[in-house]
Amino acid sequence: MALPELHRFTLPNGLRVVLAPDPSAPVIGVSVHYDVGFRSEPEGRTGFAHLFEHLMFQGSESLEKLAHFRHVQSSGGTFNGSTHPDYTDYYQVLPSAALERALFLEADRMRAPKLTEENLRNQIDVVKEEIRLNVLNRPYGGFPWILLPQVLFQTFPNAHNGYGDFTDLENATVDDCAAFFDTYYAPGNAVLTVAGDVDPAEARELVEKHFGDVPARPVPPRPSFAEPAPKGELRSEHEDKHAPMPAIALGYRVPDPVGEVEAYLSYLVLAGVLTDGDGSRLQQRLVHRDAVVVDVGAGCGLFGPLEARDPDTFNITAIHPPEVPSEQVITAIDEELQRLAEQGPTEQELAKVTARWVSTMHREHDRLTSRTLGLGSAELLFGRAELLYELPDKLAAITVDEVAAAAKALRPDSRAVLTVKPAGEPAAKPAGGSE
Amino acid sequence: MSAPTSHRSAEQIGRTELGPRPLPELGEHRVAPELSSLDTVLPNGLRVVAVRRASVPLVEVRLRVPFADPADSSTGSRHSARAEVLANTILTGTAKRSRVDVDTELALVGGELDAVVDPERLALSGNALASGLGTVLDVLRDALTGATYPADEVERERARLVERIRLARSQPNVIAREALQRHLYGDHPFAKEMPEADEVAEVTREDVLALHADAVLPRGSVLVVVGDVEPDAAVRAVEDALGGWTGERAAVELRPLPPVRGGDVLLVHRPGAVQSQIRLAGQGLTRTDPRYPALQIANLVFGGFFSSRLVENIREDKGYTYSARSHPEFTPGSATLLVDADTASEVTAAALLETRYELGRLGLVPPTEAEVDTARRYAIGSLLTATSSQGGLASFLVNLLGLGLDIDWFLGHPERLAAVTAEQVAEAALEFFAPSAFTGVLVGDAEVLAPQLRALGDVTLP
């Protein structure tokens, strides 16, 4: 894949900046990645990093509550933010005429967000609704991203629920917000990315104009979240009162995505060989031959590949009918992994996975939102936004033996097994009222 | 929570010496580069639209075959079950390709292709590296003209479909959607978005073959190609591949929908729910109606984007919801306005009250010039960003073409939005957003909700 022109510089206050010009459509993407995610939130404050992300939209020195949304949208743009294990991102995609405005909006909240009691209470309510929507009131809520780390990991940063429990959320104070902001939202702890229809010289001038006087603050030392891989098979059962069928999630540890990127990528190829497409190993075996699951998937990272630092995970999930014992599904997966470990995939299987990845990378690049966020997270986590464009070649270089080795490393005696058990809600044939 | 170092107070953080700064003006607007496109109908009746967008070396393909139930009523009709089995097996075998062959050939050109069906249409969507367009079209040709529906594939997909339907119906969003469609349209085939398990179990391979012969037809269907291709070359490639896909009759369009009339909200009991789904609906306007651009802006101001009255009220002021929105849904010849919000049980009735209040307020205290301008700019800008990728443009166009519109409508729409006046928005708001024009359903734990909803009124309790 052709390497697009990338420009990078660092402001005196430590803010790292990546510019990725592309004049093909009159739109721009602007994102800021802060180097703090939910792994950094302290005990007693689960969910705080995500709650704080909501607060960053609630106004800043030059912007009343609601003004951020209105200014982005009245410029014809869209926006969002999301909280990951190791970082929190904010983005806007707009017509290119709004470049300076977008930079102004991001700079204002990096410099002086308004953290008020009223907005904090309001957003605690909103976040609780978000958790009801995505976790508590639906089948398979938080499966596996909240549930699996609790089995696979032992230490609080890696194991806890990043959405947070309601008591912790309610206990959050404005002073917690101030401490969190001052500690983690320093310009030297962030990456600003501007992609799309920009002139690099002009964009640099505007970045300096708006972010230049954000005062430098100390950047906190980045803690290690390392912990040993599980010794043995760790099992847990979760009761889900909304789920109509059982599910399983297998969680394994993978090589450090930053320090050993090539080794990590062999697991990404393995995931493709296992579950990408009708001809993949586990689709063939579990869905079509044995017909024991409704759906099966495998992948690196609970938020997608290359989205976190070490320790990261490899996951296999499946939903299966209640008549099928979960052991039968797990045994079949283990047999397929063993077969791959012993014989490796075929060259054609690798060619399929590689070609689909090339195509996927192009498609992500074509969507300005994912291009901007991908460049920003690669720069933040790997120090190299270019990694995004090198992935197809790196994936193509992965060999049959490397994939076999990855399959061999997914050992039953060092993994987490989470089973989801339907907890028998009164069978829901919803009763309608009489009209 | 203790910070590692001493920190400033929230007050200190929110203030700088310089004080608040002025918002920069917007810069110069650049126009999108002109699209090179071709729109033609092949001798077999298939309409083909090809657009060149060479941003990345890929190509996106979207085929839409109208696929409605020809019956008047879904009661006793087996169409929905047969159509679902057909969509799940049309790509599982032909005379020359097995299911795995299809996957392998597509994968080797970085491609994928899938089929889904709803009460309106069968959609086959795919993409590949631009060099693989021929492969995607050949697989498509093979499936359209020679799908064999192997007996073992039909049997397995049928069983899997029953399980998937069961999974889908455990989702609150799906429960609410099915209840709303039944409430609005009764036994009209449009309301039947999913078959029942026993209906699926009865579908035979012969049923699916017969439905394919009867209903998978080029006349009335649309195929869109967007990507790194010359439009005339793309049209030629489609014609070469799909020219032999024939059929005398036209594919079956959805029969007209009855208009949505205002009325009570129906409470649907979901035991143990901790959150409720509010789903309201009113009559909208088709995109060809001259009043549509004004209604589009009125809808945005009501709940169509984040900076809307509904979101600012029930989310940003009151914290009743994470997600509230209103949006139009288009069908050939008709349109509805849908209002959705999910709220905790204890604030559901209050959220319904506020939603009705905002519906009334939109007509009685109409959108200001500033609200209209914000919504207008958002409408124009978001159309630009949503269609700036190949996939986004392809999906947008195929939906537009399915409604009988064309690329000129898309290119001309920003101008129509620019011409809308606040008076026109006020008229549309008063007519279409009257609380009395809406009906709907509310899914939640009736035991918790009933006392408050009874007090609020205009809700039919179980």
Image (spheres, rainbow, N blue to C red):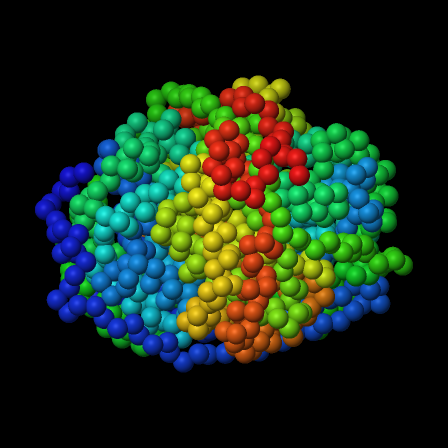
Q: For this rendering, which residue is in front, A7 or A78? A: A78
Residue furthest to the left: B6
Residue at figure coordinates x 35%, y 43% from the top left? A125
- Taking the image as shown, residue B289 lies to the left or right of residue A172, namely right
Task: State which quarter of the image contains the C terminus of chain A.
Answer: top right
**Where does residue A334 sit, x and y in percent of width and height?**
52, 25
- Taking the image as shown, residue B377 lies to the left or right of residue B123, namely left
**Where does residue B33 sit, x and y in percent of width and height?**
54, 77
Residue furthest to the right: B248
Q: Is residue A284 visible?
A: no
Q: Is residue B166 visible?
A: yes
**Where does residue A299 sit, x and y in percent of width and height?**
48, 39
Q: For this rendering, which residue is in front, B1 or A286? A: B1
- Taking the image as shown, residue B69 lies to the left or right of residue B435, namely right
Residue at figure coordinates x 27%, y 70% from the top left? A207
Report which quarter residue B328 is drawn in: bottom right
User: Does residue B147 sit above or below A388 in this rendering?
Assistant: above
Residue at figure coordinates x 26%, y 73% from the top left? B22
Report which quarter residue B246 is drawn in: bottom right
**Where does residue A276 sit, x and y in percent of width and height?**
57, 42
- Taking the image as shown, residue B195 lies to the left or right of residue B180, namely right
User: Does residue A401 sit above or below A63 in this rendering?
Assistant: above
Residue at figure coordinates x 66%, y 35% from the top left? A434
